[in-house]
């Protein structure tokens, strides 16, 4: 995890906890295999990478995302016309609700949650609208051996119900995105381990996000709440986090198997527009 190990790109860590900026790459020109190998290795090392000052079309963003794997289709927001894997994430000057405004791992409510998310900044407010990231591997490592034993083998019920279900917050929220309501997907439930093993690095990470988790397997909601709250507060404590300030043309790609993120909603009166693509992952184990 040092700069010398990269020959084609420069990787500059963004914080002590996670994240790195990648320099020397023009995504619009395409990324050759050798450069991609280094980007992929840096991504596994740092969990979230940032590329500044890029000017990429939805097609160019799609081509870069495809180098990470098969693309996911987001079930709840209409994609850009002609780009079935690119969804717009927009907050207008006069809307209050923001997309992703709570700590979470993207699409953890699916049987196979997405592994990667790419987010590209098209319009950014003059201040605010940053995204926070938290390192779930570091959060797991910092737990006591007693707590690790309690979590070993524990599963949680994941669902999109609280956000995209029949009475989820997105039904009532004021936002400009065109929603695709699909109650079979919004109300589906899947069991995932609360501690997952990263399929590429073998490292363990906490896997539990409050917007998408209902309860622990075999427990009632109110019985699950105290431990869920502890884990949420522990995992998002400042030593495990970083904050990214967007500029137009920034692209971030994060590893949902190892991080949670939080889109800040602190820019009332200004517009923010992003394009997002997710890459398919595996069943967590
Ligand atoms: C998301 O949760 O994927 C959106 C994050 C952001 O808009 O900063």
Image: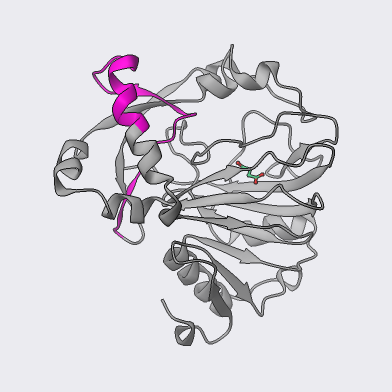
* Residue 202 in the figure: left or right of residue 51: left
Quadrant, the N terminus: bottom left
Residue positioned 77% across, 30% down in the render: 177
Residue positioned 34% across, 62% down in the render: 201
| Quarter of the rendering containing residue 219 | top left
Note whether 6 is above or below 188 in the view shown.
below
| Quarter of the rendering containing residue 228 | top left
Asked if residue 91 lies in the magenta stretch, the reply is: no
* Residue 60 in the figure: left or right of residue 283: right
- Judge whether residue 213 can be spotted in this image: yes
- How far from the left and from the top, in percent, is residue 222? 33, 15
Residue positioned 53% across, 55% down in the render: 254
Q: Give the residues drawn in magenta, as a range.
A: 202-229
- Judge whether residue 192 can be spotted in this image: no
Quadrant, the C terminus: top left
| Quarter of the rendering containing residue 155 | top left
Note whether 169 is above or below 39 in the view shown.
above
Asked if residue 214 lies in the magenta stretch, the reply is: yes
Q: Nearer the viewer, residue 261 or 188?
A: 261
- How far from the left and from the top, in percent, is residue 112? 44, 38
Ligand 1 is found in the corner quadrant, namely top right
């Amino acid at each position: 995890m040092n700069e010398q190990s990269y020959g084609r790109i420069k990787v500059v860590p963004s914080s002590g906890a996670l994240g790195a900026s990648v320099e020397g790459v023009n995504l619009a020109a395409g990324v050759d295999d050798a450069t991609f190998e280094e980007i992929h290795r840096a991504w596994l090392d740092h969990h979230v990478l940032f590329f500044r000052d890029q000017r990429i079309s939805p097609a160019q963003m799609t081509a870069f995302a495809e180098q990470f794997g098969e693309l996911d289709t987001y079930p709840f927001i209409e994609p850009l016309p002609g780009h079935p894997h690119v969804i717009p994430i927009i907050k207008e000057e006069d809307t209050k609700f923001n997309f992703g405004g709570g700590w979470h791992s993207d699409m953890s409510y699916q049987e196979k949650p997405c592994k990667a998310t790419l987010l590209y900044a098209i319009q950014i407010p003059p201040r605010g609208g940053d995204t926070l990231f938290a390192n779930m591997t570091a959060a797991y490592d910092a737990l006591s051996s007693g707590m690790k034993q309690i979590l070993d083998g524990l599963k949680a019920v994941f669902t999109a119900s609280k956000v995209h279900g029949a009475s989820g917050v997105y039904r009532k929220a004021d936002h400009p995105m065109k929603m695709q309501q699909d109650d079979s997907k919004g109300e589906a439930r899947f069991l995932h381990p609360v501690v997952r093993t990263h399929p590429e690095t073998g490292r363990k990470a906490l896997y539990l996000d409050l917007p998408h988790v209902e309860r622990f397997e075999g427990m009632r909601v109110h019985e699950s709440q105290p431990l869920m709250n502890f884990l949420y507060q522990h995992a998002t404590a400042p030593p495990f986090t970083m904050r990214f300030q967007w500029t137009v043309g920034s692209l971030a790609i994060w590893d949902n198997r190892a991080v949670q993120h939080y889109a800040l909603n602190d820019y009332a009166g200004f517009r923010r527009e992003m394009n997002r693509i997710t890459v398919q992952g595996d069943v967590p184990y």
